[in-house]
Image (cartoon, coloured by chain):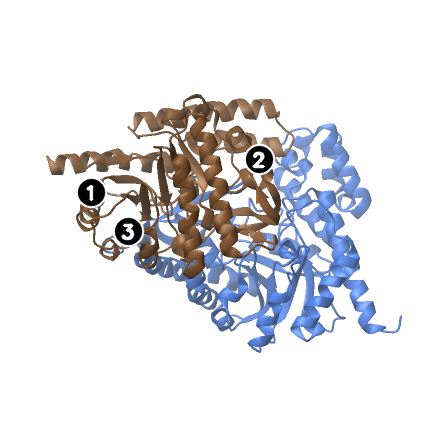
Amino acid sequence: MIVRTGLTGAFPRSEALVTATRDLDRGRTSAEAVEELFAKTEEEVVALEHRLGFDDRTAGYLRWSDLFRPFAETWEGFAVGPLTRWLETNTFYRQPILLAPPGRTPGAIAARLPPPLVRSPKTARVLLPGPYSFSVMLDNRSGETESALIHRLGRLLGDEVKELRGRGFATFLFSEPQLVVQPPEGPRAEAVVAGYRAVEAALNGGTSIVWTYGADARPAFPLLDRLPVSVVGVDLAETEVDHLPAGPSRTGLGLGVVDPRTTLPEDPVEVARVVRAAHARRRPSAVWLGPGAPLDLLPWEPATRKLHVLPAVARALSEGSA
Amino acid sequence: MTRGLFPTQEIGSLAKPRWQILGQRSEPLDESAKEELRLWDSRTGFAAEAPEVRDALLGGRPRDASPDAVRDLGALFGLRFLETAGLDRVYDGEARRIEMYEHPIRQMHGFRFGGHVRSFDNKYYLKAAVTDEVRLDRPYHVDEFEFVKAHARAEPKLPVTGPYTLADWSFNEYYLARQPGWKGRAARRAAQQEFVVDLARRAVRPTLSALIYRGCRVIQIDEPAAGTHPDEAAIVVDGFNAATEGLDAEFTMHICYSNYADLLPTLLEAKRCRQWAWEFANRDTPGHDGYEVLKVLAEYGDRRDVGLGAVDVHRDAVEPPEVVADRIRRAAKYLGDPQRIWVNPDCGLRTRSLSVARAKLESVVAGAALARAEIENPRR
């Protein structure tokens, strides 16, 4: 079994960053001091990812306020809207308000990527909102139909991928909770496929990962299996292994085996058992292990501790198959 | 008690004044903290009620004022700040609490704090894991209520964090570990139910009972997490009902940043709740009527009062009274009954500066007066 490991979303800020960013808001520290701490902490996350043997690096996306903010603040047609609950969590995002058909601002997202990734793009995992989740979670006042918007966002994200490929980035993870929370049907589902075709056309040999979480993935599999992407990830805290459709699967199988909703540590042996069952059922080209949902639902220390489960599971799998 | 139309109330905490933070640490006040104390004393008169504490703080003798005395002055400040803004129902700005989650959890056994979790932007909260059965040494909020009761000039309304929110904002280790097999959604839900009801019976209800015994008549159960998992609305209700079982007080339920329609009609089973105090202004944006959701309550025939969030607590821009009045007007139309409306901020104002918080509260009061005048004197 080919096993790959890595983060699937933002990592929590360290306690030092929590203090520093709070102090910044209260005028008790300087932007320069906070910037210095962000840079240091990003390096710590990269070092952790390296130490744990992850296949690529994220640096934690510690500066991003939420998944959409870099886009809502820099792309054309957007305004930053009201505080809105992020799925079924006690965290919130500013809902992007789309006032006109959206347009990319070249270079804007590259400028928001964590600096360690920009310095080493080949080993970076770029985090992007999936076109469907983006379209569902924004407030669309642009006049575009939902399907047209999904497709347009897919094309724009494809253009983003193309630009980033030109800068040397090769791995792109699309965060797509809504594909399983509210699985699209009919023209909206077709628009999702078309959107990812646009991404595929821009990939040029790169890797695309669609990561779903927030609900049982079973109802979405007819669509997920059609997506022209390299890997489809599901959150095993939400999806029973028995609910995965039988393979062989054309894509890699992403398995969210670390649950950020609880500090209760996962048992690597039990997780390895579940991963083997999932692998036997789907028969994918490779298994991609990661947190089921973004780990920033946890504080820094428990998140760090829980991440150690991933290499332990990989070891258990390799020992079991030897 | 008879009231005019559109009485006003606070919802939660205020930012702690810097003089209180420094004073409680027995640190000398810097010039800005002194200025803050003088400014709000001149506007509300609170410090004149404890001149020896004020003089010790302003005179650079912080050790002459005990941390408890400074904390009392902070509570007095919160009370007068809200009363002089013109609110009908007040509390002390939660001056004695760390915040609404950490404070009650620290009164209980069975929890371990593990670090901060980001709520949004640069806002975080300290999150604990429940690692053992919940136990309470003694009821909490009692001393603070006694102080408020002794000093309040307006009617006190005491906020208590609800059992569902305490559970949802904690990591569930103990109850989840007791669930057999893979810890998927079904296991999480069963563990949550057990945790919430334990919190309600072992911690929240004994506290409510003690408060009511001491004369507390109006209690706001804060359940901001209620909308987090819409399929757990029945657990929210179970927690509320278990926490208030057999108790006689005017209970209200505060929920915010949620899709209220998703919680209905299940939420209506919270039988002892007399008022829904919900956030609306945050979602009232150009082109989107944030109050239209109130139609749902009318559709279900629910006749309880509504605490109407009429100003956004997460933006500094102060809504003019005319905007507040317009929001009240729309809410009255959707509810079909202006008599059932209380007016308040969306949520606690602790993330705003005191000057912004005060301006927003004054706007709440002035906006309510405007709307009241329109209805009581329609020809004017």
Name the element at disc 3.
helix
Name the element at disc 2.
loop
Colour representing chain A: brown
Report x, y in % for residue A71.
55, 40
Report x, y in % for residue A251.
27, 44
Name the residue carrying label 2. Answer: A105
Task: Place residue A204 in its image quadrant.
Answer: top left
Quadrant occupied by the N terminus of chain A:
top left
**Labels 1 and 2 share a subunit:** yes
Question: Is residue A175 at all visible to an observer of this figure?
Answer: no
Q: CA distance from mark 1 to mark 3?
A: 19 Å
Q: CA distance from mark 3 to mark 2?
A: 48 Å
Q: Is B241 situated left or right of B292 in this image?
A: left
Callout 3, which amino acid? Ala
Which of pointers 1 and 2 lies earlier in the amino acid sequence?
Answer: 2
Task: Place residue B71 in its image quadrant.
Answer: top right
- Image mark 1: chain: A
Q: Is residue B99 above or below residue B164?
A: above
Residue extending farthest front: A201
Report x, y in % for residue A165.
42, 30
Report x, y in % for residue A191.
44, 53
Instruction: Pick the residue in front: B173 or B84.
Output: B173
Task: Place residue A242 in its image quadrant.
Answer: bottom left
Instruction: Pick the residue in front: B255 or B159.
Output: B255
For the point 24% across and 47% down, the residue is A249
Colour representing chain B: blue
Q: CA distance from mark 1 to mark 2?
A: 43 Å
Tell me the number on the disc at residue B177: 3
Name the residue carrying label 1. Answer: A272
Whether tag 1 and tag 2 are in contact, CB under 8 A, the answer is no
Q: Is residue B93 above or below residue B328?
A: above
Callout 2, which amino acid? Thr
